Image: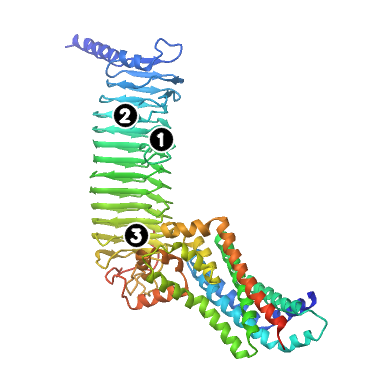
Amino acid sequence: MKKVLKYVILDIVQNKTVLIYTLLLAIISFSVFSLESNSSKGLLSLLNIILIIVPLICIVFSTIYIYNSAEFIELLLSQPLKRKAIWLSIFGGLAVSLALAFLIGVGIPILIYQPNGTGFMMIAAGLFLTVVFVSIALLSASFTRDKAKGIGLSVFIWLYSSLIFDAVVLFLLFQFQDYPLERVMVILSFLNPIDLSRIQMLLQIDISALMGYTGAIFREFFGNNTGIAMSFLGLTGWIAIPLFISLRKFEKKDL
Amino acid sequence: MKKLFPILIFAIFFGLSTQAKTYFVGKGREITKIQKAIDLAKNGDTIMVDAGLYKEKNIIIQKSITLIGINHPVLDGENKYAIITIKANNAKVEGFKIQHTGRSEITELGAIMIYDSYKVSAVNNILDDNNFGIFVQNSKSCTIKNNSITAYGKNELQSGNGIHCWHSDSLIIVGNKIKGHRDGLYFEFVKNTLVWRNISTENVRYGIHFMFSNHNTYIGNIFEKNEAGVAVMYSANINMYNNYFLDNWGDATYGILLKDIRDSNISGNNFTKNTIGLYMEACSRINLYKNIFKNNGWAVKIQASCEDNDFTKNNFIGNTFDIGTNGSLVLNTFTGNYWDKYEGYDLNKDNVGDVPYHPVSMYAMIIDSNPAALMLFRSLIVTLLDKTEKLLPGVTPENLKDNKPVMRPLPL
């Protein structure tokens, strides 16, 4: 398994797309920090990058990578290797290399310009989102053999979690305006990994506004150490569950 | 005439020496009780008190005397009594440590109580664990200076105010440090008063609270981490300059809440890290200029019931929301402020933006009617909605805008 993991990582790190992705992140981060007058405003612009671009690139790249390496996977399957080991190595390889790209592209600028709690929370959230969307990419790739369908599914999942889900929540909020929805909102936020990371960062950046009544409930839940642990546990769930389902599918798949 | 002169001088000396006598109180001295010295003294005399612990129940001063503590002698109220009561003009209390007043549901018990007096001063005292700190009632031209007033109030009902003034005129309140009382400073029916360089922190309710108090001036005070911030109501002709309102966090907590304030000036103040920096309700004709609003949840919440207020040359930096409001009626003006969220341009480089800035974001309006929606703040859908609203205002009050937003922060 170690050997396979090593080969996958080496293969992806040499991939041009990943190099460009790293470079792009680095350029955006550095320019955002040096253009804005104060670095906390730069952090806000970076927030959008982390919540939108990182998941998109991760999920699309991972899906394409799996379809492109179908022959490599078939070759590995002819060797005396467990299917589980192969699938987990591919996941590990993708996760490690994309996380590395994120760390270099965004982590280093943040550490230079904002080495504080907010910055660290941002790096942690970005890393988790990277791995979550790699895991979801594996799931959508394991559903169908058709490359176009798989990529379509991935893009749809990204669209759902970054836009559609929030729109639906906003709609629900207005439909059920007369009911106390604060606690429901806390539960709802666990249904979307991007929301979970966004709320953690809101608690760092907009702490003053969140001290109001509704904010008090969020802060009570997410703001203390148990809350932070809970939301990262939620994100871990978003990694583990899709990975587990895709692993099941892959183990029984007729290739 | 020549003969008369030495007699005159002699008379003056004699007069002075009888007028200003000094009594010493302390262990091992002739007089051991402060109250006894006060009883012996005449108007204009001075009483010096040695360091030590004095438990004399309520000390009552009804003469124009000066009471001075050497090295802060301790006056203890044994959790039962008020400690010093002054009912005389020109009296002065200086340099004591006054602690443990009683608490009563019926009467107000405090460390220094000043009733119906003129030109009384309380200077350099340390007040610790009292119900009321300094209590001024029906008095004029009193000075309260450099006192350190600390209490450990747990709830609003069981604690008193740090400096409590009722129906008074021309007070001077300077350089006091107040902590842990119900309201740090409390004024009701107080006129022509100067409040300068006081620090009011961590009080159970308000840092400062005044009602029906006109023509007062507040300069260079610091109000920090009070449970409900600062609230001032039903007053006119207030001047507030260079005060600091910091770290007042909570649902009903404001840097400062202005209710029914009119004809006032608020300038040079610093509002930082409050849930709501400035909240205005039914206020009119207030000039707000050269203030700094920084890192607040809402910099300003201005209700539609306010009119003719003018915001000029303020800096709005790093606030989650710049302005919040509850209606579409706008009778206030915003001119020449710096808004860090302004995205306009300045073609002729005169440092004034060429397009107006609308400081009320759509989402601020949404949250105002549906607070739970705060959870979606900064998500993609909300950002898109906000941008659309900026292009085609529909929900936000169209007239609430700054026509001359400046491009760079004002040097304040």
**Is residue A243 or residue B148 the one in the foreground?**
A243
Where residue A148 sits, quadrant-wise, is bottom right
Report if residue B120 is visible in the image.
no
Q: Amino acid at mark 2?
A: Met
Residue occupied by mark 2 = B113
For residue A119, above or below residue B46: below
Mark 2 vs mark 1: tell me if same chain. Answer: yes
Say which mark, if any, is on residue B300: 3
Q: Sort mark 2 into few (<14), some (14-19) or many (20+) by Cα contacts within 10 Å.
A: many
- Chain for numbered disc 1: B
Residue occupied by mark 1 = B149
Which sits earlier in the primary sequence, circle 2 or circle 1? 2
Numbered circles on residues, count: 3
Say which mark, if any, is on residue A199: none
Report if residue B177 is visible in the image.
yes
Q: Amino acid at mark 3?
A: Val
> Distance from label 2 to label 1 (Cα)?
14 Å
Q: Amino acid at mark 1?
A: Ile
Asked if the residue at tag 3 contacts the one at tag 2, i.e. Cβ–Cβ closer than 8 Å, the answer is no
Answer with left or right where residue A53 lies relative to residue A249: left
**Is residue A248 or residue A150 the one in the foreground?**
A248
